[in-house]
Amino acid sequence: MAEMAFKAATTKPAESAPKAPSLPGAKEFVSLRIDRDILDHFQEAGSGWQERINAALRAAAGK
């Protein structure tokens, strides 16, 4: 049992598959929880609210 415990503690975990390269300008579908008042703010101006949220997040990330 000690040998099994040692082996489990010292064995390097298998590497996960490499992440696929992202395409420039490609959009990724995600699920995101946003406070209702923030969502209302972006939806007030009508269609394009998702792009406005994306632009605000991009600016906050400094990109």
Image (cartoon, rainbow, N blue to C red):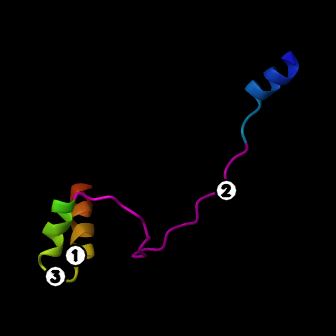
- The CA distance from mark 1 to mark 2 is 35 Å
Which quadrant of the structure image shows residue 47? bottom left
Q: Of 32 and 20, which appears nearest the observer?
A: 32
Q: Is residue 5 left or right of residue 63?
A: right
Judge whether 17 appears above or below 46 on screen.
Answer: above
- Provide the secondary structure element on which disc 3 rests: loop
So how many labels did they put on this image?
A: 3
Q: Of 24 and 6, which appears nearest the observer?
A: 6
Task: State yes or no: residue 7 in magenta.
Answer: no
Q: Are marks 1 and 2 in contact (CB under 8 Å)?
A: no
Residue at image coords 63%, 57%: 18
Q: Which three-letter amino acid code belongs to the residue tagged 3? A: Gly
Q: Which three-letter amino acid code belongs to the residue tagged 1? A: Trp
Q: Is residue 25 left or right of residue 9?
A: left
Magenta part of the chain: 14-35
- What numbered label is drawn on residue 3? none
**Of discs 3 and 2, which sits in the foreground?**
3
Decide: few, some or many residues near mark 2? Use Cα within 10 Å; few <14, some 14-19, many ≥20. Answer: few
- The CA distance from mark 3 to mark 2 is 41 Å
Task: State yes or no: residue 22 in magenta.
Answer: yes
Residue at image coords 87%, 19%: 3
Residue at image coords 27%, 59%: 34
- What numbered label is drawn on residue 17? 2
**Residue farthest to the bottom, as pictured:** 47
- What numbered label is drawn on residue 46? 3
Q: Are marks 1 and 3 in contact (CB under 8 Å)?
A: yes
Judge whether 23 appears above or below 34 on screen.
Answer: below
- The CA distance from mark 1 to mark 3 is 7 Å
User: Which residue is labeled 1 in the image?
Assistant: 49
Decide: few, some or many residues near mark 3? Use Cα within 10 Å; few <14, some 14-19, many ≥20. Answer: few
Q: Is residue 5 left or right of residue 53?
A: right
Judge whether 30 appears above or below 43 on screen.
Answer: above
